[in-house]
Amino acid sequence: MESEFEISCSDITLIEAEWEFDSAKTIMDEDTFVDEWTLASDVTVLHPQGVAGFNLDLNSDKSVIITFYQPSMGDVLYNPDVPFLSAWLQEHGWDMPEPHPDLVRVHDHFWRHFWETSIIQSGYLDNKYGGREEQYED
Protein backbone atom coordinates (compact mmCIF):
# COMPACT_ATOMS: atom_id res chain seq x y z
CA MET A 1 0.00 0.00 0.00
CA GLU A 2 1.37 3.40 -0.97
CA SER A 3 1.69 6.14 1.61
CA GLU A 4 -0.68 9.06 1.31
CA PHE A 5 2.23 11.32 2.24
CA GLU A 6 5.05 12.63 0.07
CA ILE A 7 8.09 14.41 1.41
CA SER A 8 10.73 16.42 -0.42
CA CYS A 9 13.69 18.53 0.64
CA SER A 10 16.11 21.08 -0.77
CA ASP A 11 19.36 19.71 0.70
CA ILE A 12 21.43 17.73 -1.80
CA THR A 13 23.11 15.63 0.91
CA LEU A 14 19.73 14.56 2.31
CA ILE A 15 18.52 13.75 -1.18
CA GLU A 16 21.64 11.70 -1.94
CA ALA A 17 21.40 9.94 1.45
CA GLU A 18 17.68 9.27 0.94
CA TRP A 19 17.13 10.89 4.36
CA GLU A 20 19.09 8.12 6.15
CA PHE A 21 21.19 9.54 9.00
CA ASP A 22 23.97 6.94 8.60
CA SER A 23 24.28 7.70 4.88
CA ALA A 24 24.26 11.46 5.48
CA LYS A 25 26.95 11.02 8.13
CA THR A 26 29.11 8.98 5.73
CA ILE A 27 28.74 11.62 3.03
CA MET A 28 29.58 14.44 5.44
CA ASP A 29 32.55 12.53 6.90
CA GLU A 30 33.95 12.01 3.40
CA ASP A 31 33.27 15.53 2.11
CA THR A 32 34.09 17.72 5.11
CA PHE A 33 36.84 18.08 7.68
CA VAL A 34 34.60 18.85 10.65
CA ASP A 35 33.15 16.63 13.35
CA GLU A 36 30.00 18.68 13.86
CA TRP A 37 27.78 19.72 10.97
CA THR A 38 24.25 20.89 10.20
CA LEU A 39 22.20 20.24 7.09
CA ALA A 40 19.71 23.09 6.67
CA SER A 41 16.83 22.14 4.41
CA ASP A 42 13.46 23.38 3.23
CA VAL A 43 11.05 20.46 3.53
CA THR A 44 7.63 20.03 1.95
CA VAL A 45 5.10 17.46 3.14
CA LEU A 46 2.20 16.76 0.77
CA HIS A 47 -0.84 14.75 1.86
CA PRO A 48 -4.58 14.60 1.07
CA GLN A 49 -5.40 17.31 3.64
CA GLY A 50 -2.91 19.83 2.25
CA VAL A 51 0.70 20.91 1.99
CA ALA A 52 3.01 21.78 4.89
CA GLY A 53 6.36 23.55 4.81
CA PHE A 54 9.20 23.19 7.28
CA ASN A 55 12.72 24.51 7.62
CA LEU A 56 14.83 21.93 9.41
CA ASP A 57 18.34 21.92 10.83
CA LEU A 58 19.50 18.30 10.87
CA ASN A 59 22.63 17.92 12.99
CA SER A 60 25.57 15.53 13.24
CA ASP A 61 24.36 14.38 16.68
CA LYS A 62 21.05 13.19 15.08
CA SER A 63 19.09 16.11 16.55
CA VAL A 64 16.58 17.90 14.33
CA ILE A 65 15.44 21.47 14.99
CA ILE A 66 12.30 22.82 13.32
CA THR A 67 13.15 26.47 12.64
CA PHE A 68 10.07 27.32 10.56
CA TYR A 69 6.70 25.66 10.09
CA GLN A 70 3.80 26.49 7.76
CA PRO A 71 1.02 24.05 8.70
CA SER A 72 -1.39 22.47 6.28
CA MET A 73 -4.15 23.16 8.83
CA GLY A 74 -4.41 24.92 12.16
CA ASP A 75 -6.38 22.33 14.12
CA VAL A 76 -3.82 20.62 16.34
CA LEU A 77 -5.97 17.55 16.97
CA TYR A 78 -6.32 16.70 13.27
CA ASN A 79 -3.02 18.04 11.96
CA PRO A 80 -1.02 15.20 10.34
CA ASP A 81 2.11 17.23 9.42
CA VAL A 82 4.13 17.03 12.63
CA PRO A 83 3.28 13.38 13.46
CA PHE A 84 4.25 12.32 9.93
CA LEU A 85 7.50 14.30 9.97
CA SER A 86 8.46 12.94 13.40
CA ALA A 87 7.81 9.33 12.39
CA TRP A 88 9.63 9.81 9.06
CA LEU A 89 12.72 11.25 10.72
CA GLN A 90 12.88 8.54 13.37
CA GLU A 91 12.40 5.78 10.77
CA HIS A 92 15.43 7.21 8.96
CA GLY A 93 17.72 7.29 11.99
CA TRP A 94 17.25 10.86 13.22
CA ASP A 95 16.03 11.87 16.68
CA MET A 96 12.53 13.07 17.43
CA PRO A 97 12.35 16.67 16.15
CA GLU A 98 12.40 19.70 18.42
CA PRO A 99 10.75 22.98 17.43
CA HIS A 100 12.89 26.05 18.02
CA PRO A 101 11.91 27.73 21.32
CA ASP A 102 10.74 30.86 19.45
CA LEU A 103 8.16 28.75 17.55
CA VAL A 104 6.96 27.19 20.79
CA ARG A 105 6.66 30.51 22.62
CA VAL A 106 4.43 31.91 19.87
CA HIS A 107 2.23 28.79 19.53
CA ASP A 108 2.50 27.14 22.94
CA HIS A 109 -0.85 25.28 22.77
CA PHE A 110 -0.10 23.80 19.36
CA TRP A 111 3.36 22.49 20.23
CA ARG A 112 2.39 21.44 23.77
CA HIS A 113 -0.09 18.92 22.35
CA PHE A 114 2.63 17.24 20.28
CA TRP A 115 5.08 17.38 23.21
CA GLU A 116 2.55 15.83 25.62
CA THR A 117 1.89 13.00 23.16
CA SER A 118 5.65 12.37 22.63
CA ILE A 119 5.63 13.34 18.97
CA ILE A 120 8.23 16.07 19.50
CA GLN A 121 10.74 16.90 22.17
CA SER A 122 11.15 20.38 23.61
CA GLY A 123 13.60 21.59 26.21
CA TYR A 124 11.56 24.79 26.40
CA LEU A 125 8.36 22.90 27.32
CA ASP A 126 10.29 20.58 29.68
CA ASN A 127 11.45 23.67 31.57
CA LYS A 128 8.06 25.40 31.47
CA TYR A 129 5.83 22.47 32.45
CA GLY A 130 8.22 19.97 34.03
CA GLY A 131 8.61 16.47 32.66
CA ARG A 132 5.96 14.80 30.57
CA GLU A 133 3.58 12.38 32.18
CA GLU A 134 4.31 8.78 31.29
CA GLN A 135 1.94 7.70 28.52
CA TYR A 136 2.28 3.92 28.88
CA GLU A 137 2.84 1.45 31.66
CA ASP A 138 5.31 -1.43 31.32
Image (cartoon, rainbow, N blue to C red):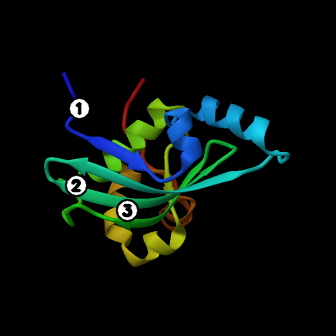
Image quarter hosting the N terminus: top left
Name the secondary structure under disc 3.
helix
Horizontal placement of 89 versus 114: left or right?
Answer: right
**Residue found at x 59% / y 34%:** 21
Q: Nearer the viewer, mark 2 or mark 3?
A: 2
Corner quadrant of residue 3? top left
- Which mark, by number, is residue 55? none
Q: Please tell me how crowded label 3 is: few (under 14), some (14-19), or many (20+) other residues with Cα within 10 Å.
A: many
Residue at 46 percent of width and 39 percent of height: 89
Residue 118, percent from left and from top? 41, 45
1 vs 64, left or right, is left
Viewer-nearest residue: 137 or 108:
108
Q: Name the residue under label 2.
A: 79
User: Between marks 2 and 3, how big is the CA–CA gap?
Assistant: 11 Å
- For badge 2, the amino acid type reads Asn
**Could you tell me the amino acid type at mark 1?**
Ser
Farthest residue toward the bottom? 106
- If the image is split into quadrants, where does the C terminus sit? top left
Q: Is disc 2 in contact with disc 3, using a CB cutoff of under 8 Å?
A: no
Residue 39 visible here: yes
Q: Check disc 1: other Cα within 10 Å, few if <14, some if 14-19, many if 20+.
A: few
- Residue at (39, 38) in percent of width and height: 87
**Residue for badge 3:** 111
Up/down of 52 relative to 14, above or below: below
Which dot marks residue 3? 1
Whether residue 119 is visible, yes or no, is no
Of callouts 2 and 3, the N-terminal one:
2
Q: Which of marks 1 and 3 is in front?
A: 1
